[in-house]
Image (cartoon, helix red, strand yellow):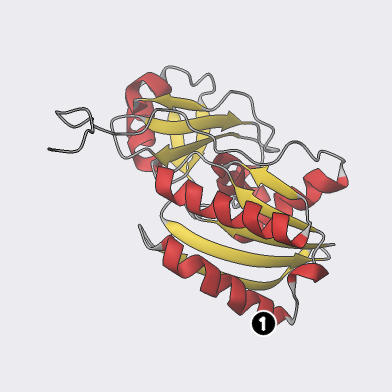
Amino acid sequence: MRILALDTATTACSVAVWEDESVRARRFEMMPRGQSEALIPMVVDVLGEASLSFSDFDLLAVTVGPGAFTGLRIGLAAARGMALAAGLPCVGVTTFEAVAEGIAPEERAGTDVLIALDAKRADVYAQFFLSNLEPTSAPLALPPAELAGHIVSTRLLIAGDASLRVAEAASVCGIEAVISAAPGVADAAHVAAIAARRWQAGETGQPPEPLYLRPPDVTMSANGGRLRP
């Protein structure tokens, strides 16, 4: 099975070619912005390295959020456009799932997991998982102190780029919070691995849609957006 996976949801941009349970080609770069310029050249690079074209793939996969509004739109638009042009199915994977997939099995063994992502405001985006990465909560958007009140275990492994903020709030509540050594952002290679399992299990789902946990930060102009005379 061959999968082309994309991620532009947060502060990184990555593309991966997944084939027969392993990564055949991959590009990954940290970038808070600029994914719109970087994504397609990365796709061209991995296709060239793997000597593949779109017709050689079985599936496309992409992160659906939560994350930056612009970044999400870039990845989703690219993935859905490629899937439509190539006549391929497209699977969406949440940013929570993709970050959790990056935690080594031995590190998360025997402990609950919390993925905490920077929302660029007082809130953090978060979701709880069991050690086998089965979700135990809905996606949340809460301040760290309020999120700490949702923790029911006495020891917790936290991953994501907001891990430190949540760990500090958890420690105030007497909870042992350990910050994972895993990367705090999603990786297209992990997106592909999740999509492969989901597809093989027959969980095709609907075309991917963005997962927004709060409204966009927009301010209406004083004249309601009307052109000046």
Label tally: 1
In this picture, is 156 found above or below 72? Answer: above
Instruction: Tell me the SS state at disc 1.
Output: helix
Residue receiving disc 1: 48
Binning the other alpha carbons within 10 Å of mark 1 as few (below 14), some (14 to 19) or many (20 upward) gives: few
Residue 133 coordinates in the image, percent (x, y)? 67, 38
* Residue visible at 87% across and 47% down in the picture: 200
Residue 65 falls left or right of residue 193: left
Q: Answer yes or no: is residue 33 visible.
A: yes
* Residue visible at 44% across and 61% down in the picture: 35
**Quadrant location of the N terminus?**
bottom right
Which quadrant holds residue 131? top right
Which quadrant holds residue 119? top left
Q: Nearer the viewer, residue 4 or 20?
A: 4
Residue 27 falls left or right of residue 204: left
Q: Nearer the viewer, residue 196 or 42?
A: 42
Q: Answer yes or no: is residue 68 visible.
A: no
**Quadrant location of the C terminus?**
top left
In this picture, is 188 found above or below 138? Answer: below
In this picture, is 142 found above or below 25? Answer: above
Residue 135 coordinates in the image, percent (x, y)? 65, 30
* Residue visible at 74% across and 82% down in the picture: 51
Amino acid type for the residue under numbered disc 1: Gly
